[in-house]
Image (cartoon, rainbow, N blue to C red):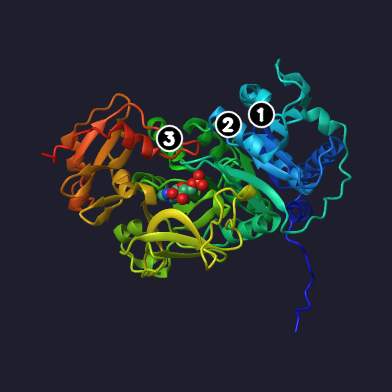
Amino acid sequence: MQGLMQDWPLLVTTVLDHARTNHPEQEVVSRTIEGPVHRYTYADLHGRAKRCAKALQKLGVREGDVIATLAWNTYRHMEVWYGVMGLGAVCHTINPRLFTDQIVYIANHAEDRYLFLDLSFVPIAEAIAERCPTIKGYVLMTDRAHMPQTKLKNVLCYEELLAAEDEHFEWVKVDENAAAGLCYTSGTTGNPKGVVYSHRSNVLHAMGVNTADIMGLRAKDSVMPIVPMFHANAWALVFSAPMAGAKLVMPGGKLDGESVHQLLEDEAVTCTAAVPTVWLGLLHYLETSGKRLSTLQRVVVGGAACPRVVMEKFEDNYGVLVLHGWGMTEMSPMGTASRLKPRGEKAPRAEQLQQKLKQGRTFYTVEMKIVDDAGKELPRDGKTFGNLLVRGPAVSKAYYKGEGGQILDRDGYFNTGDVATIDPDGFMQITDRAKDVIKSGGEWISSIEVENVAVGHPSVAEAAVIGLPHPKWDERPLLVVIKKPGCEVTKAELLAFLEGKIAKWWMPDDVVFVTEIPHTATGKIQKRDLRDRFKDHKLPTVS
Ligand code: AMP
């Protein structure tokens, strides 16, 4: 027997339609690239996204075409995002932090037709234009008065394109499984690979992420996605905020502590999300300026492990709840968040912190398990490490154009490349990327955990732990540290600081001080480069 419910395709345009109909007055506030703060409503956003779709149609863009963006989080980026998807085309957000050669590679691989860009990224477009023959034109997301001198050919002014259209446009009714978004992961080996989101995966994922124990956004929330739209859908907030009717605050390109604080306060932000480096910057600003956070209720920290100091300071000094989240581009991107269960709520503070610092538990639509190298499922005892596998309606089943071949196992699970434990409450904890684990005496040392404790030292700006070969133990950890400007700390002081906070045999065999630690375009430490750099370093424990 078949159910007798309607066939209502899960298209992302239904999200914006919902916001326009039910929350037309709700504000969308942006710090523009030109400088001033811009504000309008979901009704305005809806209207201008339709104009954008119409303008694209006039430019010859059709269903399935790929349109690229090089842009910060602003209202214009949202308009292009929904305009492109509403035309049945595919919005390809390019990470401007990638190397020029990588951007050229992905623009060609994706066969981008047009590139919409912020003023700040004109130099990047100029550098790639000659080598990207599929790009027919460049749309500068500004008005006529701010159009710069550029050697780019086929340049269009965004505001002029929109001014020439009206809002009467029917979203193109594509299949819910049609591609809506494209985002390349900057894998550490080989070329970047394209992750293709569908309308359906985006809608389901945004609903999952917005359940009460994860983001739990409501119409009375004011939410600021600091995590960029070019980093995997801004963790679904560009869908889940309009779904909930929450006020949306877009920070543009200014992500320093002072600028972030100003918007948090001026726009009465209640929920925000970003990588740890942004939070370290904000906390430093709060401490040096003596400023407070008067409306913020919860902060989502993800993309890299949340350092203990970030959680302690937000929660203990500013009364802001920290949710540690984990995910990856291939997962749309969220997979877990660390909201306590009733047992954890009643536990002593130290125990709570320990659990909240884990990457957290999944929400409905994400299935997760750990397995050994033979693929056998491992116990959820919080101790056994294994390869972390996931599956669900918003997890990739293949990369664009089949790059990387078959990526699922027999049961449809995707190997995240992370190594983790899962405790009996379902809280997952990442030990390392599989290729970065440190194997010492047959046991694994979590470099992430050691790094997190090390950055808690007041003189440490950043820390990385890598494994170096050791004749007796196979590998032993080396701690690489950048000191905060004007601060001093010695190796002995750092080791004393770590003592008692990590297992004895996890203690680094040596500490080196550097002025720079290499990062990927998504802000992750390039451990491979560090291992190369220190491959001849002699550990004092090697005789
Ligand atoms: P990306 O696709 O660039 O978002 O990178 C995904 C990878 O980032 C994951 O597979 C993890 O290795 C890492 N990652 C993301 N969030 C966290 C977290 N909260 N803690 C530790 N690693 C994380």
**Residue lying farthest to the front in this orientation:** 405
Q: Nearer the viewer, residue 264 or 185?
A: 185
**x, y percent for residue 490:** 19, 31
Q: Is mark 3 within 8 Å of ligand 1?
A: no
Report the front residue among 248 and 289: 248
The quadrant holding residue 118 is: top right
Residue sitting nearer the eye, 64 or 88: 64
In the structure shown, which secondary structural element does the residue marked by tag 1 occupy?
Answer: loop
Q: Is residue 284 visible?
A: yes
Q: Looking at the image, tell me whether mark 1 or mark 2 is earlier in sequence order.
A: 1
Residue holding disc 3: 519
Numbered badge on residue 150: none
Q: Is residue 514 above or below residue 440?
A: above
Q: Quadrant of the N terminus?
A: bottom right
Q: Which residue is mark 2?
A: 253
The residue shown at (38%, 58%) is 420
Question: What residue is pinned by disc 1?
Answer: 118
Q: Nearer the viewer, mark 1 or mark 2?
A: 1
| Quadrant in the rendering for residue 33 | top right
Which amino acid, by three-letter code, is at mark 2?
Gly
Q: Looking at the image, which residue is at 19% across and 34% down?
A: 538
1 and 2 marks in contact (CB < 8 Å): yes
- Residue type marked 1: Asp
Check if mark 3's residue and mark 1's residue have beta carbons within 8 Å.
no
* Residue 80 picture location, percent across and down: 73, 39
Residue 8's place in the image compared with 357, above or below, is below
Circle 2 crowding by C-alpha within 10 Å: few under 14, some 14–19, many from 20: some
Marks 3, 2: nearer the viewer: 3
